[in-house]
Image: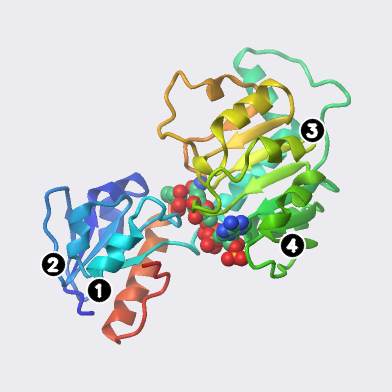
Amino acid sequence: MDIERIAVHESAGRAFPLSALVESLSSLSVPVERVTDGERYGPGDCVVTFSPREAFHDAAWVHGVRAGYDEFDTDAYEASGTALTNSTGIHGDTVPETVVGYLTMFARRLHVYRDQQRERVWDHEAYEVPFTLTGERVCVVGLGTIGQGVARRADALGMDVVGVRRSGDPVDGVERVYTPDELDTAVADARFVVLAVPLTDATEGLIDAGVLDTMPEDAYLVNVARGDVVVEDALLSALDDGRIAGAAIDAYWEEPLPTDHPLWGYENVVMSPHCAAFTNHYHEDIAELVRENVERATRGESLRNRVA
Ligand code: NDP
Ligand code: 7N6
């Protein structure tokens, strides 16, 4: 693959300032340009993008700046012979740190006190409500870059960590790794269920009414994966009926979430606008992946993180 240009698509601006990535890639011997919709691509182009566009199928290689590539039509990439790479591997600190934040908020009731601060209310939760993370069980569904980052941190906090992954292979700090067919058993005794799986045919609707019913009534669901991994109505019903204690959500069924969506209204739901991975060095992490793959392409080697 002969890369003659890196085209940084405007959609990548959702994750970092485009100029920062262009600057970080400036050491490459190929030109790096910002491009907008309407641009045409050819066999010497690598496109760096947040979102898919049909025009990209004319390029040699497309790099998605997200780990999730569920919005990309991998069959179309296979058909056109355009390589597609993703950004799995760079979210091992950001998203897990955000998850630890959610867990801590719920255990130590920080979300309640932040809400009260706005109203200048001096009050504390009832004696039996606050708890410690130490000794509580977290079930991490998906034990890749993010899941392992969550597991390591939870283990360091003295939590009892179990998890679910396709392979069932063991993970440091995870007491028991279940396979997807054992999901109900895995979540049954968990105080927290953290979703860190990709959105695929196998994971769409994975967390349905049955799984939410199986979770203990004092359990919290954390979704940093994709909205459609959770059945929307099932989550809202479980919250309405008090069948789970609450939820922290970073990924939604529709984004931005409409302002009249019921999820906004729950005091026991912590919401972040799909920014669990945001960090001021995101452009550097992407640049490193792109630089490595430009070098690999030049040497005729296979691309890292190739997904189609
Ligand atoms: P990885 O590919 O590193 O890990 C994915 C994990 O999910 C693997 O452990 C894999 O199992 C497991 N898995 C896949 N299918 C299933 C299944 N059917 N049942 C149970 N486990 C399954 O991905 P990342 O950790 O980098 O990212 C995970 C997802 O998180 C992304 O695809 C993306 O959708 C989302 N994400 C969200 C972000 C945010 O800002 N909120 C930021 C980054 C990612 P195995 O190890 O056995 O293969
Ligand atoms: C944006 C990260 C992913 O899949 O959903 C996340 O990587 C988005 C900075």
Mark before the other along the chain sequence, 3 or 2: 2
Callout 1: helix, strand or loop? loop
Task: Determine the secondary structure under disc 3.
Answer: loop
**Residue under circle 1?**
28
> In which image quadrant can residue 73 be found?
bottom left
**68 left or right of 178 in image:** left
Residue under pointer 2: 42
Residue 287 seen by the camera:
yes
Does the beta carbon of the residue at mark 3 sit less than 8 Å from ligand 1?
Answer: no
| Mark 1 to mark 4 CA distance (whole Å) | 42 Å
Report the residue at 74% width, 15% height from top: 122
Q: Which of marks 3 and 1 is nearer the N terminus?
A: 1
Q: Are marks 3 and 4 in contact (CB under 8 Å)?
A: no
Q: Residues within 10 Å of mark 1 (few under 14, many from 20)?
A: some
Q: Looking at the picture, tell me which residue is in the foreground, 137 or 142.
A: 142
Disc 2 secondary structure class: loop
Question: Where, quadrant-wise, is the C terminus in this rendering?
Answer: bottom left
Q: What is the spatial separation of the Cα atoms under label 1 and label 2, in whole angstroms?
A: 19 Å
Of the residues shown, which amino acid type is indicated by label 2? Gly
x and y percent of residue 223 in the render? 59, 42
Q: Nearer the viewer, mark 1 or mark 2?
A: 2
* Coordinates of residue 297 in the picture (x, y in percent): 29, 80
Give me the disc on residue 177: 4
Q: Which of marks 1 and 4 is in front?
A: 4
Quadrant hosting residue 63 = bottom left
Q: Which of marks 4 and 2 is nearer the N terminus?
A: 2
Task: Please tell me the numbered disc located at residue 218.
Answer: 3
Rendering coords of residue 256 (x, y %): 40, 32
Specify the farthest residue to the bottom: 299
Q: What residue type is labelled 4?
A: Val
| Distance Cα–Cα, label 4 vs label 2 | 45 Å
Looking at the image, is mark 3 or mark 1 nearer the viewer?
Answer: 3
